[in-house]
Every structure is written in structure tokens, then in C-alpha cells.
Amino acid sequence: MEAFTSHQGIVMPLDRVNVDTDAIIPAMYLKAVTRTGFADGLFKHWRYLGETTQPNPQFVLNMPRYKNATILLTRDNFGCGSSREHAPWALQEYGFRAIIAPSFADIFYNNCFNTGILLIKLDASIIQSLFEAVEANEGYHLAIDLEAQSITTPEQQILHFELERPKKEALLQGLDSVGRILRYTNEIAAFEQRRKQALPWLFA
């Protein structure tokens, strides 16, 4: 997993509440178990016209001004619905490194950190001011410093955000849940050896 220390990118506004994981990546894509091949399906039902692959010019992802966006700005309860890991995989493969919203669905929240996406919770009033700034300024960008837990706007306003320390450390080191466990392989091996000596009949 790619480590996240700092990032500066263009912001794309998705002005919708309760965006569920089926809207992020439809169920038809769930047959695949690798983490690649999902970018084209991101927001498929909104992104394309009907059942075609013709882009919907009214959907924000297709607007030229947001073509290179890497920070997603959205509303309450983003990522609700089913617990599919494919949703953060699609967002990450498309190029989003961070998502900013007032709240996220719990399972989606954890899945994103295991994918290397930084999720930032800010008050709804701050989110609203960011939406207004993005709308008014093409190419609006933010600079995120994970170590300092801060966001710097083009106007040099600094916004601070809270984040659980284990998730912060994992992102800084580029470790998903498996990677964090593998740091303790020696301790795990020693524990298993002690178990074999203390309870040999379990390993017969």
C-alpha cells in the first residue's frame, strides 16, 4: 500500500448525501477479487448515459474542470450500504487520495484506510464553505499534511482534523491491516512455539 504523508490536489465536489457503495461501484463489478479494473465503473450509474458508455456531461466526474481531481469533497454518510471493498478500490484506482465529508459509513471508513485513502471528517459548516469555494474557483486545490493533521486552502486558511492514531500511523507507514500484523511475525512465531510446548496435544 502506498504511504500517505502529504498531498496537494484539485478538489471535486460531489454534492450528494447518503452515497452508497452500489452508487460508487455497481454490483456487476463484484465478481473480481483483485484491486484493479474498477476505475471505469466508478459512479457508473451517474457517470454514463443509460446503459451506454457515453459520458453524462452533467455529472461532475465528467466535467473538464475536475478531470485531474484527487480529493473528493462530499456530504454526510458517504459510503453507506453494503460493505464491499470494491468501492474504495474503485476510488483509489481512479486517482482519489483523500475524501472529505462530515461523516462516513463505518465499514467503508475502515476499508478506505486499508486501501490507502485518507478520510477526513469536518464540520458540515466547513464542508459547505469548501463547496462554495470549489464552485467559485476553477482548479481549487487543497494541501493536506497528515503528520500535522491539517488542510491548507489556497487562501492559506488552515483547517485541522482529528484522526485515530493507529489509522494515522498505518497510513504514514503504508501499512494495511495485514501489513500491520506482519510487523509482529517474530512475536507470533514465539507465541506459537510456547503454545506447542505447553499444549503439545493440540498439535499432534
Image: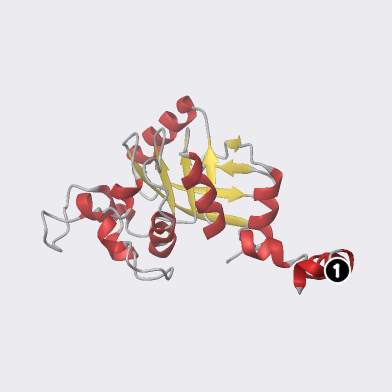
Name the residue located 48 percent from the left edge and 42 percent from the top edge: 100
Q: Residue furthest bottom?
A: 204
> Could you tell me which quadrant the N terminus lies in?
bottom right
Question: 10 Å neighbourhood of mark 1: few (<14), some, or many (≥20)?
Answer: few
Q: Position of residue 15 (x, y in %)?
A: 32, 37
147 lies left or right of 35: right
Name the residue located 47 percent from the left edge and 47 percent from the top edge: 108
16 lies left or right of 8: left
Q: Is residue 153 above or below residue 1?
A: above
Q: Is residue 147 visible?
A: no
- In this view, the residue in front, 51 or 8, is 51
Q: Position of residue 202 (x, y in %)?
A: 76, 67
Q: Is residue 111 above or below residue 189?
A: above
Q: Is residue 133 above or below residue 36?
A: above
Q: Position of residue 34 (x, y in %)?
A: 42, 71
Q: Position of residue 147 (x, y in %)?
A: 69, 50
39 lies left or right of 192: left
Name the residue located 85 percent from the left edge and 68 percent from the top edge: 190
Under circle 1, the secondary element is helix
28 lies left or right of 163: left
- In this view, the residue in front, 169 or 74, is 169
Q: Residue furthest top?
A: 125
